Image (cartoon, grey):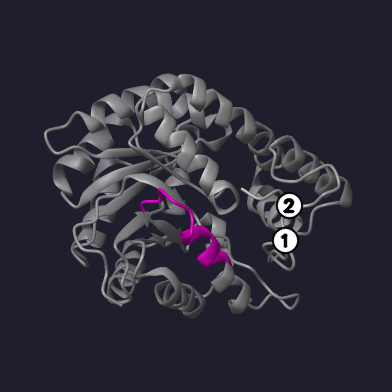
Amino acid sequence: MARHRDYVPHGVIPAILLPFHEDFSIDEASFRSHLRDIAAVEGLSAVTVNAHSTEVASCTTDEQSRVMEITGEEIGAKLPIVHGIWADGSLEAARIAKRAEASGASALLVFPPAPFTHGQTADMAVAHFKTIADATDLPLIIFQYPLATGQGYPAATLTRLCDEVLSIRAIKDWTQVVQQHENQVRMLQSRARPVNVLSTNSAWLLSSLVLGCNGLLSGSGSVIADLQAQLYRAVQANDLAEARRINDRIHPMASMFYSDPFVDMHNRMKEALVLLGRLPRAVVRPPLVKISEGEIGRIREALVKAGLLDAAGKRIAA
């Protein structure tokens, strides 16, 4: 599959979920259907695979390659594909980058190495990204974690990365401190060679977008890509009334998806798709476990409040 050349990460980019059978093997038929559902939404810029939403930490290298292959077959001609780079070592990250490019990816989402939780320096971060950049000419997206995790990059490190690794074209900003988030939007998007800020703060997406992000990249797009696209368009058009109306529909789902424990967010999204009749089952791989019936009931209530299900639990046509 030929990739979408000259793609610059921006706009609305759903992060795709990965359905499994009861035996934890990949449900390829349901995955293909899920991809087609997402790709049919108007106003998307790309999709992301092999990231948190596809439970990449539990997927083998071969499974990640198969996920990319299926995605290319189903929607690669229509939308660019962002491929996650999940690796603790820079050499393995470079190998994943090469495979992703050969498979038709249009951009790479680079997760921070887990060892950075024990401490990092700017030299380490630059070395990691340069190793990846030397292996591919694809545009890179920095996954910017909260600084409190130890895996987030301080402002000086971000500046140096963007100065020295020219293939960095965006960050997926999980910064949860509003002032830091706004500073990164202002700092990165005003550069002579702008670096787009893609919000992943889906629990407060309207507020984040109003600060000026040039896009969003979020797993909840696997459920509400249409609402996210509508919200983004309304904010871009400075139509605050419309943006607030759409956000009022998103809010009950965001509040449910991102409640404690936070790690269950994609678990809940799968259950939402089952309730909407868009997945046959909601199976997650260990150590995640199926959520309770009570919590599934609360997801159903959130979908009703969002206007996606009626009071009887039937899907409402868009």
- Taking the spot 32% from the left edge, 67% from the top edge, the residue there is 105
Q: Is residue 15 left or right of residue 72?
A: right
Q: Which residues are magenta?
A: 34-45
Q: Are marks 2 and 1 in contact (CB under 8 Å)?
A: yes
Q: Disc 2 designates what residue? A: 315
* Residue 310 sits in quarter: top right
Q: Nearer the viewer, residue 14 or 189?
A: 14
Question: Could you tell me the amino acid type at mark 2?
Answer: Arg
Residue 150 visible at all: no
Q: Disc 1 designates what residue? A: 277
Residue 247 visible at all: yes
- Taking the spot 51% from the left edge, 66% from the top edge, the residue there is 36
How far is the residue under mark 2 from the one under mark 1?
8 Å
Question: Could you tell me the amino acid type at mark 1?
Answer: Gly
Residue that lies at the very extreme toward the left in this rendered image: 192
| 226 over 73 or under it: above or below | above
* Residue 299 sits in quarter: top right
Task: Tell whether position 272 is magenta.
Answer: no
* Residue 160 sits in quarter: top left
Disc 1, SS: loop
Expressed as whole percent of the image width and height from the top left, the position of residue 101 reads 28, 71
Task: Tell whether position 36 is magenta.
Answer: yes
**Neighbours of disc 2 within 10 Å: few (<14), some (14-19), many (20+):** some
Q: Nearer the viewer, residue 306 or 48?
A: 306
Q: Is residue 80 left or right of residue 208?
A: left
* Res 65 label: none
